[in-house]
Structure formats: C-alpha cells, structure tokens
Amino acid sequence: MMIGFALTVLVIIAHPDDETLFSGFLHALTHKLNATVDLVCITNGEGGFQHSAPSESIYGNLQLSNETIARQHLPRIRKQELFASGKILGIRKLFFYDQLDLEYDRNVDNVLLYQWDKEWIIQSLERTIQIGNGQYGYDLMLIMLPNTQSHGHHTASGLLALETIKRLQEKKSTTMKIPIVIGGSEFVLTDQPIYSLNHLAEISGEFRFNRKWKLSKSSDIPDYNMILLWICSEHKSQGGLIPETLNILSRENEQYFYFTLNHNSQSFQTIDTLFKRLVDMHDYDSGSML
C-alpha cells in the first residue's frame, strides 16, 4: 500500500460513540487524504441508559432513564446518532453487528461467554473485510487497543478483530487483501502498552495525531477539538459523554499503535509514511497544506 492514492479504511468499535476517541484522525483521513472510511459497530448500545435522562424530551419523552424502556429504544436511537456523527467524520458505510450491550465488565471472558457470539462476530468481520469494499478490500483497519483497564467490550472488539486478521493470514489467500492493523488508545499512555493476556495484542510502534492541529491555514479556524465536540454532541442520549471527553478523556494527542501481527516491515513503513504525511499537511507555515 502506498500513500499516493486514497486509502480504504475499516474501523471497528464496540459502542455507538466510541468513534469519538479517534475523531481527529478519522476526520483528517476523509477530509485531508480523501480516504474511504467504513465502520463496524459491534454492540447495539442498549446499555447506555445511565445518562440518558437529559435527552428524553428530544426523543419523544421516552423514559430512557428507565432500563426496560431504554433497552427497547436505545438501539434504534443510538444507530441514528452514530449515522449523524459519521456524517461529520465522513464515514461512508456503517455495519451494525447488534451484539448485546448488557453491562460494564472488564472481564473479556465474561463478555464473550455471556454477551457476544464470538464466532459469529469473527465470521462477520471476515465477510466485511472481504466484501465491504467490494473487490478492492481495505488497506487499513483501526481497532480499539486492548487494555486491562478498559471496558471489556472495547478490549473484546479489538481482540476479535486481531483474531480475524490472524485467521485470514493463515488462509494464505493470494487474491484477498488483508489490511494493516493499528490500535487506538482510549487512555493517555506514557509507556508502551502491554496486554499480556493475548499475544496478538503485542505492539511495536506508536504514532500520534495532534488534536490541536488547525483544520485550515486561516488563523481563526478551530482545531480538531471542535470536530470532537461536534460528534460528541450528536450522541445526545449519552449525557455523560461530553463531560467525560472534556475531563477524564481529555488529551492533546490521539495515540495509535502498530501490531506485530502485521509482521511486515513494509506495512510499518506505510503507517509511518501516513502519519508523517498528516504532520506535513498540517504544517501550514511550510506551505505543504492540502
């Protein structure tokens, strides 16, 4: 894969609002590099009712703070919110796998045993990778970086995506394009992340996207934090999202990590070139703007 033409990217997230973690990078991919970006959302988002009360008047006065009512209506509502967020980010296609979003649990084994259908997800990911972009496949796949301190759904979505890539590699097909995989961190990490529970999550390089980069050369144009707030505001059923984003999840840099599973030095150079190009494109003083 060269960066001389538009990339095709597949993003894997667990919940309809997890894309906010990667907002700067995704917006730059579609708006600066003209990349084609599709997105898979694993769960139906029904468990996100804890902070839904403020949005009840927006959604027909449904009692979304009531768990029973929320689980009936939130899957539909949160899909529409993700469509709205995706429109801002420039997402082309959304794939919904509609797995259960029962409860917060850091234990990935519990998630895969009691909430999700592991094999169905892997098979669906294989199909999406193979036919989601037609005969052309995907150049890059962005997943949620596995972390023992994270929501088990986040880590499980990343691990299942890595397992899918491993299985596709083992098939040794000469006609199928297997995307390069990188993982985005929801936390600010000062050391190289280690997820010892699964060797597929081993990483060998870090790349960063600065949310304080300006969207345009004009000095009065805001930075990528504006994009972040725009898409957070589309998830109105998630009343705690904006406060969490501005506080606990606040950061200057989005951090992305290269997996050794890719086992290809050329793939690493491709990702390195991609991020270096993004740096150059935002260095407006040098005249290398898009």
Image (cartoon, grey):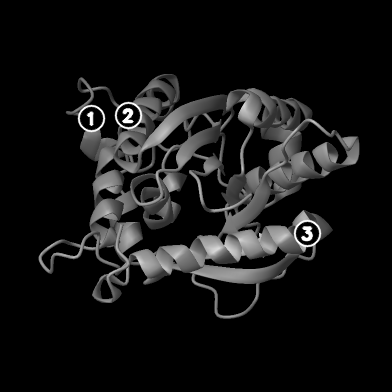
First in sequence: mark 2 vs mark 1: 1
Element class at badge 3: loop
Amino acid at the residue labelled 2: Leu
Residue 200 in sight here? yes
Amino acid at the residue labelled 3: Asn
Element class at badge 2: loop
Location of the C terminus by quadrant is bottom left
Disc 2 to disc 1: CB gap under 8 Å: yes
Residue 148 in sight here? no
Task: Decide: is 101 above or below 248.
Answer: above
Q: Which residue in the structure is indicated by mark 1?
A: 56
From the image, state whether disc 3 or disc 1 is nearer to you: 3
Residue 2 location (% of width, % of height): 59, 52
Q: Which residue in the structure is indicated by mark 2?
A: 64
From the image, state whether disc 2 or disc 3 is nearer to you: 3
Q: Which residue in the structure is indicated by mark 3?
A: 264
First in sequence: mark 2 vs mark 3: 2
Q: Residue at x 64, y 49 (%)?
A: 1
Q: Residue at x 84, y 39 (%)?
A: 167
Residue 73 location (% of width, % of height): 38, 21
Element class at badge 1: loop
Residue 188 location (% of width, % of height): 49, 71
